């Protein structure tokens, strides 16, 4: 086959029409080129830094706003629970009068029970002691956490009975007792159920009672509670979290 006399022009094959070389594009310059064309470099740096600072401030404001709302929600939840609000006036196992305010500034782990309890109370008080040891082993200041035991059986749990009973538990565990009315009142404040059963032939009786460990923050407010199924590790982890994120609650009626 003979070659065509003239080859088609080469250029259109290699460079389709839309790929014509573009003129240098002015748009490649910064959008502020018009306004800042005459601006020295330090000026432009200042503008950018100012914008970044404004963005950071905005972000901080939003974060703070989120935290504020979270705090307000938590306050509402705790107020709705209204647990442990009231004060108490009891006496400890050394005979010293103790009021709730005496524990302000300290984290308190509080358990309600009675010394004649055959198994649950000793187990829970053992666990309470181990939680305190775990937290102190992990860096909590010694004395930052006060383990507290309040009897639901003041008739038998006298100051002397409590003093004897405490020998088996954590050395800093404090046990509190008081008049039947004072003990009933503090139980009510924490919604502790306690009901003495019928006495047996020797006059011995059991007290059916609810089992929970309460965590009070340094401002005396209830922050959490743990049922019997929670292990000492789980409780210690939760307490540590509360300690790390603790923010005191403002007095009631305050909204921020
Ligand atoms: Ni018990």
Image (cartoon, helix red, strand yellow):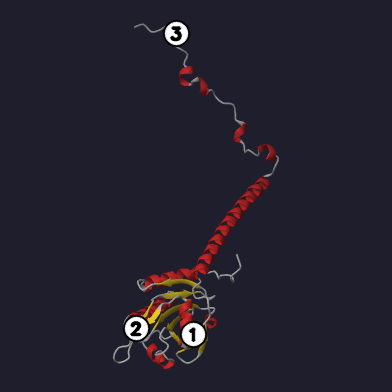
Could you tell me which residue is drawn at 33 percent across and 87 percent down? 205
Residue to which mark 1 is pinned: 182
* Tag nearer the camera, 1 or 3: 1
Element type where label 3 sits in the image: loop
Q: Can residue 113 be seen by looking at this rendering?
A: yes
Whichever of labels 3 and 2 marks the residue nearer the N terminus, that label is 3
Mark 3 C-beta to ligand 1 under 8 Å: no
Element type where label 1 sits in the image: helix
* Tag nearer the camera, 1 or 2: 2
Residue to which mark 2 is pinned: 197
The residue closer to the viewer here, 6 or 76, is 76
**Ligand 1 found in image quarter:** bottom left
Residue 256 appears at what percent x and percent y?
Answer: 60, 64
Answer yes or no: do the residues labelled 1 and 3 have beta carbons within 8 Å?
no
Residue to which mark 3 is pinned: 6
Whichever of labels 1 and 3 marks the residue nearer the N terminus, that label is 3
Work out which residue is located at the far right of the displayed protein and give it: 38
Residue 212 appears at what percent x and percent y?
Answer: 40, 75
Could you tell me which residue is drawn at 63 percent across and 49 percent down? 51
- Residue 138: quadrant of the picture: bottom left
Could you tell me which residue is drawn at 47 percent across and 13 percent down? 9
Q: Can residue 177 be seen by looking at this rendering?
A: no
| Alpha carbons under labels 1 and 3: distance apart | 116 Å
Whichever of labels 1 and 2 marks the residue nearer the N terminus, that label is 1
| Alpha carbons under labels 3 and 2: distance apart | 117 Å
Mark 1 C-beta to ligand 1 under 8 Å: no
Residue 74 appears at what percent x and percent y?
Answer: 52, 65
* Tag nearer the camera, 3 or 2: 2
């Amino acid at each position: 086959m003979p070659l065509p006399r003239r080859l088609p022009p080469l250029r259109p094959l290699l460079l389709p029409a839309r790929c014509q070389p573009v003129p240098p594009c002015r748009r490649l310059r910064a959008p502020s080129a018009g306004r800042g064309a005459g601006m020295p470099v330090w000026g432009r740096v200042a503008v950018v830094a100012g914008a970044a600072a404004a963005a950071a401030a905005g972000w901080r404001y939003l974060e703070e706003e989120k935290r504020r709302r979270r705090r307000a929600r938590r306050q509402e939840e705790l107020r709705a629970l209204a647990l442990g609000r009231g004060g108490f006036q009891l006496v400890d196992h050394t005979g010293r009068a103790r009021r709730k305010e005496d524990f302000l500034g300290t984290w308190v782990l509080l358990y309600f029970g009675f010394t004649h309890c055959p198994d649950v109370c000793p187990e829970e008080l053992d666990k309470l002691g181990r939680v305190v040891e775990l937290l102190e082993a992990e860096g909590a200041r010694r004395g930052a956490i006060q383990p507290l035991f309040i009897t639901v059986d003041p008739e038998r749990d006298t100051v002397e009975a409590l003093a004897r009973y405490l020998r088996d538990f954590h050395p800093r565990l404090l046990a509190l007792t008081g008049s039947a009315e004072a003990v009933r009142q503090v139980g009510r404040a924490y919604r502790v159920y306690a009901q003495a059963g019928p006495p047996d032939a020797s006059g011995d009786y059991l007290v059916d009672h609810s089992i929970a460990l309460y965590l009070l923050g340094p401002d005396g407010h209830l922050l959490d509670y743990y049922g019997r199924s929670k292990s000492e590790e789980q409780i210690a982890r939760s307490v540590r979290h509360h300690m790390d994120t603790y923010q005191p609650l403002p007095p009631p009626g305050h909204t921020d």
